[in-house]
């Protein structure tokens, strides 16, 4: 039998339902006002805020990985610049 899953927190489905509920609560009654661009813009902003709550953490991870990659590329560049020159033997 496979091991049981650990109950370390809410499941993905319940977290998604909670996000949807939060969006519905914040935009209650506004979706019927389809004429106003400002209302539609507000609804989109609220949706992005709720759905993308952890984008800051993702962005920080991405920046860290990019910084490491750039540092490694710089090290390789310096190695290639300051490497000992290989002398070719003369062909007779």
Image (spheres, grey):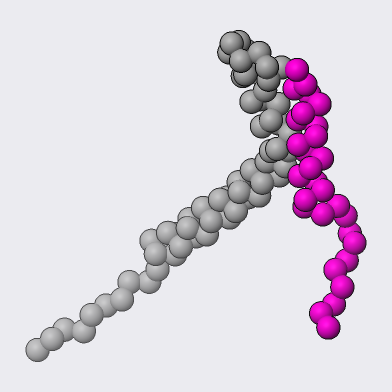
* Residue placed most toward the observer, 84 or 41: 41
Residue extending farthest bottom: 92
* Residue placed most toward the observer, 3 or 36: 36
* Residue placed most toward the observer, 80 or 28: 28
Q: Position of residue 84 (x, y in %)?
A: 38, 71
Residue extending farthest right: 7
Viewer can see residue 71: no
Is residue 92 shown left or right of residue 83? left
Does 36 appear in magenta? no
Q: Position of residue 36 (x, y in %)?
A: 60, 10
Q: Position of residue 22 (x, y in %)?
A: 80, 32
Viewer can see residue 41: yes
Does 26 appear in magenta? yes
Q: Is residue 85 above or below residue 82?
A: below
> Residue at left 83%, top 83%?
1
Is residue 48 shown left or right of residue 72? right
Is residue 42 shown left or right of residue 92? right
Q: Position of residue 9 (x, y in %)?
A: 88, 55
Quarter of the figure with the C terminus: bottom left
Q: Is residue 14 above or below residue 52?
A: below
Q: Is residue 75 above or below residue 63?
A: below
* Residue placed most toward the observer, 48 or 20: 20
- Residue 68 location, quadrant: bottom right
Residue extending farthest front: 32
> Residue at left 75%, top 30%?
23
Q: Which residues are magenta?
A: 1-29
> Residue at left 61%, top 15%?
34
Total number of numbered discs in the rendering: 0
> Residue at left 80%, top 34%?
21
């Amino acid at each position: 039998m496979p091991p049981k899953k650990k109950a370390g927190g809410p499941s993905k489905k319940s977290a998604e339902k909670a996000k949807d509920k939060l969006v519905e609560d914040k935009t209650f009654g506004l979706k019927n006002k389809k004429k106003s661009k400002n209302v539609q813009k507000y609804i989109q902003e609220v949706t992005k805020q709720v759905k993308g709550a952890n984008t800051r953490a993702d962005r920080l991870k991405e920046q860290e990985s990019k910084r490491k990659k750039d540092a490694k590329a710089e090290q390789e560049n310096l190695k290639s610049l300051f490497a000992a020159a290989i002398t070719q033997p003369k062909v007779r």
